[in-house]
Image (spheres, rainbow, N blue to C red):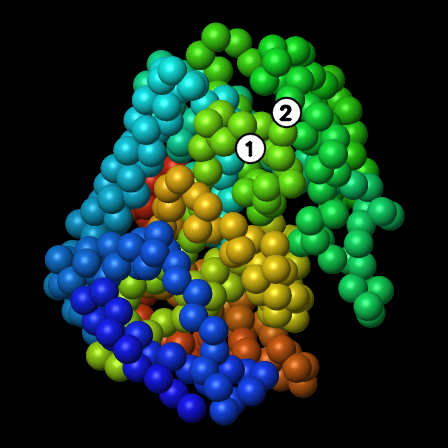
Amino acid sequence: MWGITPFHDGFLLQVPSREDPSHLADFVDQPKTFEMFKEALRWNIIMGLSTVGDVNEAFLNGRASELIQIAEALQEKKIVQIAEEIDRRYRSENPLKVVLITGPSSSGKTTFCKRLSIQLKACGLKPISVSTDDYFVNRVDTPKFPDGSYDFDNFDTVDHALMEQDIMKLIAGEEVSVPEYNFVTGLREYNGKKLRLQEGSVLLIEGIHALNPVLTADIPDSAKFRIFINTLTGTLLDDHNMIPTSDNRLLRRIVRDYNKGAFSARESISNWQNVLAAEQKWIYPYQETADVMFNSAYLIEFAVLKNHAEPILRSVPQNCPEYSEAHRLLKFIHYFTPVSDREIPATSMIREFIGG
């Protein structure tokens, strides 16, 4: 069973339920996500880059440098707008104290947090950053999947009781010793890092569980500003086929993990379905609670990722289960004309994944 119904200025195609194909899947309205995706499509139409063919033609006509500059300007403009709204809220009758930043894997949370901090400083504020990763429980206490492997995306991977306690102390003006998680030893360590919120200070909390209401249950909504980062690819393969947004993030993750020596392409691909399942359980249920959404998709991202991803994907052995997915991704990025990353600034969102 399929359904079609008017939706905004278009139509909504309703698909069958996976559990019972004789019935339509439940529709969950996501107006903020819809508007972010609509904005991405609108900019691609303005730029004349609706499909992969449009992007390739622009590169062949020598527009790569111009498109890199526009991509950076669009993202910086949005970050400036968010910083100005935070500044306005900070100086209101009910000043905010905490900015919560979250998003799915490889959405660019770390770089976004750094760039937002710079813009907040330009507004005269004093941002202080804390990551939920630093409040991970010791690895021996990490939740596990039924097969015995670690479930690193589980909410209970974070010592949320301790983190909320420290947040409340910071808001109250107290000095707090903040832990740092050692990913090599799998232990939470106290290395002398201390924080205190001063006049003009705003606490930025970044991590995949930052918008989970349990983490900040005792903090009034008026004191919180929620930001959800996603990677909504607006470019189409052609007039009839969209690019899955998860492919965008998977390619980012493969390149980043390989360059950092954290995981091979085979390992990243093998773990991807667990990552997606965890996002549906722990991250996406809270995206519509965000005060603002930020799209970290880069205007010409696949053309830039291609040079980095191809040799990494070719390293996946043909005799393993992950080879078919690596082969599919190789065929996918083959559609793009490659572009050098030489002109991409060091502060760019895409640098979090390709390095430099």
The N terminus is located in which quarter? Answer: bottom left
Picture coordinates of residue 174, whole percent (x, y): 65, 11
- For residue 134, which quarter of the picture? top right
Please name the residue shown 29% across and 32% down the image: 80
Circle 2: is it few (<14), some (14-19), or many (20+) Cα within 10 Å? many
Tag shown at residue 205: 1
Left or right: 172, with 308 as reference point: right
Helix, strand or loop under label 1: strand
Q: Cα distance, mark 2 to mark 1?
A: 9 Å
Earlier in the chain: of badge 2 and badge 1, it is 2
Which sits in the foreground, 129 or 64?
Answer: 129
Q: Which residue is mark 2?
A: 167
Left or right: 247, with 196 as reference point: left
Left or right: 186, with 172 as reference point: right
Which amino acid lies under the numbered mark 1 shown in the image of this protein? Ile
- For residue 121, which quarter of the picture? top left
Picture coordinates of residue 227, whole percent (x, y): 44, 40
Picture coordinates of residue 102, whole percent (x, y): 51, 44
- Check if mark 2's residue and mark 1's residue have beta carbons within 8 Å: yes
